[in-house]
Amino acid sequence: MSNSGQDTQPAGPMRVIERAVYRGPHLFGDIPMIRFQLDLGALEAFPSNTIEGFTDALLERLPTLHNHACSRGHAGGLVERLREGTWLGHIVEHVAIELQSLANIPVTKGKTRSVKGHPGVYNVLYEYLEEEPGLLAGRLALELVNDLLPDELRGVRGLDILHRGATPEPFELTAALEQLRKLERRTGLGPTTGSIVAEARRRGIPVMRLDDQSLVQLGWGKRQQRIRASITGRTSFIGVETASDKDLTKTLLSKAGVPVPQGAVVRSADDAVREAARLRGPVVVKPLDGNHGRGVTTDLTEPDAIRKAFAVAAEHSRRVVVEQHFEGNDHRLLVVGGELVAVAERIPAHVVGDGESTIAELIEAVNRDPRRGEGHEQVLTKIKIDAQVRQLLEKNGMSLDSVPLAGQAVMLRGTANLSTGGTAVDRTDEIHPDNACIAIRAALSLGLDIAGIDFISPDISKSAREVGGGIVEVNAAPGFRMHLQPTVGRPRPVAPAVVRMLFPEGETGRIPIFAITGTNGKSTTGRMLSHILRQTGLTVGLTNTSGVYVNSEQVLKADASGPKSARMVLHDPIVEAAVFEVARGGLLREGLAFDKCDVGAVTNVQPDHLGMKGIDTVQDLAWVKSVVVENVASHGVSILNADDVLTARMRRRAGGRIGFFSLQGGERMPRFLREHILEGGLAVVREPDNGGGELVLHQEGRRRLLMRAAEIPATIGGLAEFNVQNAMTAAAMSIAHGVDIHAVRLALATFGTAFEQNPGRLNVFDGHGFRVIADYAHNAAGLIALRELLVKLRPMYPRQIGMISIPGDRRDEDIREMGEVAALTFDELVFREDPSRRGRKEGEIIDLLVDGARRAGAHDRRIHRVSDEIHAAETAMSLARPGDLVVLTLTEVEDVWRSVLSFRPAARPRATSDTLPQLSQDLPEPIRRRATGADGENRPHA
């Protein structure tokens, strides 16, 4: 076995570079998949048809690969590709899928794609159900393929990136599959929980595992229900406690007119013998609060046998029940929501003689049945030899060494539980209506929504009130295995009854999800939208770069723009609507937190975060952002920025209906948008007026005035066009979901620039004799959009000071561009470091910003270098004179705002500001156009 945490394979051509586990829709598809990046190295020159004997050896190891259609669309398609020649990354994908299938994990989908610009490097993707077995399957697939290569090509590095742990060495397929099966059994859902989950998914109800056992959430937010096996969130605790007390259960059922055996609770073997004598006839001895048939002995008459049975029962409970032994067959009746949904006759573990084998040998043969496994992992459970088996054989004059006659049935258990090796025969269509009513009455009497009724009857097709028998036990958490896969008879799909009880027809357990992505404007748009939805009375969960919020309560302070934070909102039991900021990083790391959203929006796509994770161009970034709108539900709406070329193009592949927002109303309106409106499509458009413009709603051929842009406080009288766009996006999203236009108007009219309402986004403070604007503008596009506002404010604030930084993980050229735009915007520049620097050396960010500012013509006397963000903010404010404007682009939002509030300016006379520096004529044309706002075709959006 290889040592955990180390790659013991010799360094060879293949290397695993990275991995990602996609839990929701992602760049490559809409189902959960594992992706790992594989560098074939020298093996890029060796497709399968060039490696002598490889294909035949692979098919000998995994003959079931003959069933793979691959891209050919028919069985045998993969074999054709192998013989024609295909690359090892593609082969590993199919092997990972097949290994899971052989381990009883039903997956079928995968794909392999070359990585642009990196010859010999491939993204290998394949479907999985549970993460750990899926990752192990990828590692084992690499090891299997590697094992088939000639010595000179053999070797895989980076296996622990996929899955850390011991695997067979040298590779051995049988051991590998057993390892995978064991991991699947340990991490996968059991048959009861799994059947409910499968039915929920069939109904379109979201499913979220809450632990590594069987606790599962069905649905989202306020509409969720929870299950653990057949216990639901609605299961009565009192009912469960009552069912576990067998004596109390009998008392309550007897009072309800349900036939139950007479008996009593005893505390000693002598008491058990006396109670059996009182009952006059065969008795059953069992623990008061046992389950799964443990400690139960049936059909007892002799005092010595009763004493032994008491000792067995006492191992499981301090109190023991002695009761009448009902003659007849053992049946399990499943009641769900007051409805009888399945009946199974349970036959105790037994063997049938062949006239030659001993009972021990017959048990061994029965256990070789592939349907039998340990615990609940298979349809049937292996028969275990224990004291009860030996006692029952002894009672019948036999032992494990006895050789039964051919055809002779030898019972090994007195109880018929499947967990002790029993088998099941479906009797659902045979039960007498009286018996069904008795079972339903029993479940209702104990207050159980789901109950397994143990019913003894000589003939289940006849009324117990006529032929005798009755209920001997009620189980509060019955297993479904015997009904889903009976040994004999028709399988019964019992899970639909459970899901129907929790979610009546027409209910999906979903809350409306609003997802917002784009380069700039996501946070403010999300806060505006949340504000609108709250005005309608909804409890709203919101995620953004500042944290997770439920209404006005911040439940987590962090950068919460990824799927983990979104799931936190979906878990919250009071949330009625969810608004998610969806950032690039989380999408690349694990995809979306949801399968479909009701309304998705893309604010814009600008060059930011390029050169990371394979996203090298703005077109690549648009591909990432489009994942949100591609996964809008068919009944939903995708809202797109009509003024942004890359965003507007997404209309061709976006889901649901399409809606737009645009600043270019009137004569400037793009033709495609005009046609969209004429066809009755949804659009929110700014049309020119004497102020900041009118926001007009177009919907179903009707034109309605939403409000004037200047009426939205966050737009600073309509001057902040980026917040006009943000407001239009929020309005379009809410109206698309059916929010009344009047509610939208009222909400936007009360959304301002206060820090408390929208921290770090165009917050204004006028308490120091000069104006402070705090804003998150963290890239050149955002700063250019902010500059447009500052140009409009310059007549009121002639001298403008800026504190500027940019995250350290941006490209050098992006950081320099930020410095250039800053130099073209501010009279005084205070450059600071990003607090985390993100891999940069101390001072490196400032050096690049200064380099960009100098390129734009800024003199060093205008440039101030201050590494620490708080000190930089204080420096910028110290440079201010009465009537100036200080702009703080911040990272540590709350700390900087506190420094703004606590700042004490020194008294100084007001000075006349210098004029804004002219644009340097030797600037690159794209930067000049963006900085001056001349690039109207792809207008930035902050």
Image (spheres, rainbow, N blue to C red):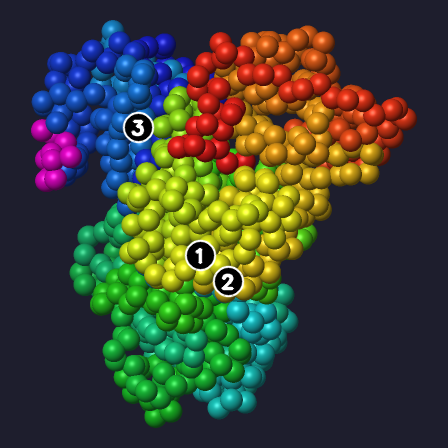
| CB-based contact (under 8 Å), mark 3 and mark 2 | no
Q: Of 821 and 172, which appears nearest the observer?
A: 821
- Residue 697's tag is 1
Q: CA distance from mark 1 to mark 3?
A: 46 Å
Instruction: Count residues near mark 2 (Cα–Cα under 10 Å), then give few for <14, some for 14-19, many for 20+.
Output: some
Is-magenta flag for residue 76? yes
* Image quarter hosting the C terminus: top right
Q: Which residue is mark 3?
A: 124
| Residue at x-position 35% and y-position 58% | 635
Which contiguous range is marked in magenta? 71-80
| Residue at x-position 74% and y-position 21% | 913
Q: Amino acid at mark 2?
A: Ile
Q: Amino acid at mark 3?
A: Val
Q: Amino acid at mark 1?
A: Leu
The answer to which of marks 1 and 3 sits earlier in the sequence is 3
User: Toward which corner of the image does residue 574 lie, by quadrant?
Assistant: bottom right
